[in-house]
Image (tube, rainbow, N blue to C red):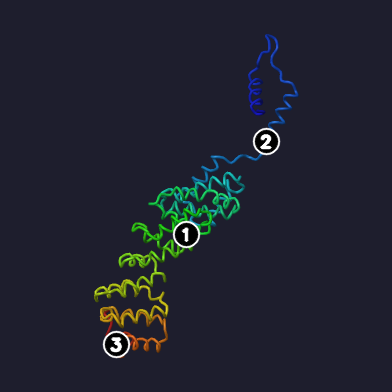
């Protein structure tokens, strides 16, 4: 009301108003002092307001193809802009923009990276304000994510797992059920992400028990993790032909040997002893040699286990097989070079 009166009186003074034919409007000194006080009280004593222009600048920055891919770089960038000394409303609005982008928009890989490092950077700079904004906003944004796009929530939680507590229980349930029944389109990325999200880890491990050969091969090509060992051994045990055993031994087990434990070694040797298709397969000695070379069990213990599970004859044959690769053939050593 005070500023409206100032606005009107300003126009009356700028465009002289005649009170009569001979008398122009002359505001009294008291009215001038009144307007000066109101201008200071309502406007001049306050710092500049960071509004849409400041937010637009931040959005434009992170959309740049040259925006940094590191949190430290984002902090340096933001420290020389509107986020250096921001008002709470600017921080809140920027956090909302970042959350909606990460969870609701189909971002390119570069833009998604920019959003992640930006949220981490502003959270590092203004932790209390950002934490409050996330706690008030995150669950509502997650609720708006379509079921076909829930992998975006996994991507977000993989980067900000500690904000799981800000998502409401019914949405927790939806994410758990989604992880248990990961569709084929999301399987590879979704499993790898959810294995690293503690509240979803057990659901991801349960989903792993249902993967087939091709799915597990694809997972192993992307990431070689200890969680994939049990499904690989399970499929290996189910081999009904030498061809299946060859494929699973080469594509699954051999690639995961560095992640084996002694219990895994016992389990594999035991199944080789009872499944003749595996024991007679072409890749069986290769799997055993990989295990031996990894030194998962002492040499003497390994030989004893071979004899126990596969018999003395097989253990002897394996020793001869391994020796062919340990000791080069003499007449090959002295062959002249081709060049």
Image quadrant holding the C terminus, namely bottom left
Query: What distance separates the C-alpha of mark 3 from that of mark 2?
Result: 92 Å
Judge depth for marks 2 and 1 and give the one in front: 1
Badge 1 density bin: few <14, some 14–19, many ≥20, Cα 10 Å? some
Query: What distance separates the C-alpha of mark 2 from that of mark 1?
Result: 46 Å
Task: Name the N-terminal-most of marks 2 and 1.
Answer: 2
Which mark, residue 250? none
Confirm whether residue 333 shows in the render: no
Where is residue 315 drawn, in percent x and y?
32, 88
Where is residue 75 drawn, in percent x and y?
56, 54
Q: Left or right: where does residue 197 sit relative to residue 80? A: left
Residue highlighted by disc 2: 44
Task: Name the N-terminal-most of marks 3 and 1.
Answer: 1
Task: Name the N-terminal-most of marks 3 and 2.
Answer: 2
Residue at the (49%, 48%) spot, across then down: 140
Q: Are marks 3 and 2 in contact (CB under 8 Å)?
A: no
> Residue 310 occupies which quadrant of the picture?
bottom left
Q: Left or right: where does residue 222 sit relative to residue 336? A: right
Residue highlighted by disc 1: 158
Looking at the picture, does residue 277 appear above or below residue 219? below
Query: What distance separates the C-alpha of mark 3 from that of mark 1?
Result: 47 Å
Looking at the picture, tell me which residue is in the foreground, 338 or 201: 201
Looking at the picture, tell me which residue is in the foreground, 88 or 308: 308
Confirm whether residue 129 shows in the render: yes
Where is residue 255 drawn, in percent x and y?
35, 73
Which mark, residue 314? 3
Judge depth for marks 3 and 2 and give the one in front: 3
Badge 3 density bin: few <14, some 14–19, many ≥20, Cα 10 Å? some
> Residue 311 occupies which quadrant of the picture?
bottom left
Where is residue 195 drawn, in percent x and y?
44, 64
> Residue 295 occupies which quadrant of the picture?
bottom left
């Amino acid at each position: 009301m005070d500023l409206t009166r100032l606005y009107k009186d300003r126009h009356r003074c700028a465009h002289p108003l005649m009170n009569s034919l001979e008398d122009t409007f002359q505001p009294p000194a008291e009215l001038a002092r009144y307007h000066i006080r109101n201008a200071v009280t309502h406007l001049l004593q306050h710092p500049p307001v960071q509004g849409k222009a400041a937010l637009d600048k931040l959005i434009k920055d992170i959309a740049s193809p040259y925006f940094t891919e590191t949190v430290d770089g984002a902090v340096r960038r933001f420290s020389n802009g509107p986020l250096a000394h921001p008002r709470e409303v600017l921080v809140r609005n920027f956090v909302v923009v970042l959350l909606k982008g990460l969870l609701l928009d189909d971002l390119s890989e570069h833009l998604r990276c920019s959003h992640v490092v930006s949220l981490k950077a502003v959270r590092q700079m203004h932790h209390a304000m950002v934490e409050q904004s996330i706690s008030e906003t995150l669950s509502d944004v997650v609720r708006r994510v379509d079921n076909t796009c829930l992998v975006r929530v996994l991507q977000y939680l993989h980067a900000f797992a500690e904000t799981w507590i800000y998502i409401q229980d019914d949405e927790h349930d939806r994410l758990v059920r989604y992880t248990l029944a990961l569709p084929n389109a999301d399987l590879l990325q979704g499993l790898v992400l959810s294995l690293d999200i503690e509240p979803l880890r057990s659901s991801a491990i349960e989903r792993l028990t249902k993967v087939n050969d091709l799915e597990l091969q694809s997972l192993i090509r992307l990431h070689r993790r200890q969680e994939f060992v049990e499904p690989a051994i399970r499929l290996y045990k189910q081999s009904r032909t030498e061809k299946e055993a060859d494929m699973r031994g080469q594509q699954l087990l051999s690639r995961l040997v560095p992640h084996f434990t002694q219990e895994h070694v016992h389990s594999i040797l035991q199944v080789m002893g009872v499944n003749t298709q595996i024991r007679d397969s072409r890749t069986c000695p290769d799997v055993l040699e990989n295990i031996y070379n990894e030194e998962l069990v002492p040499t003497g213990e390994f030989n004893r286990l071979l004899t126990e599970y596969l018999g003395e004859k097989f253990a002897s044959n394996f020793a001869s097989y391994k020796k062919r690769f340990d000791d080069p053939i003499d007449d090959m050593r002295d062959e002249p070079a081709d060049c």
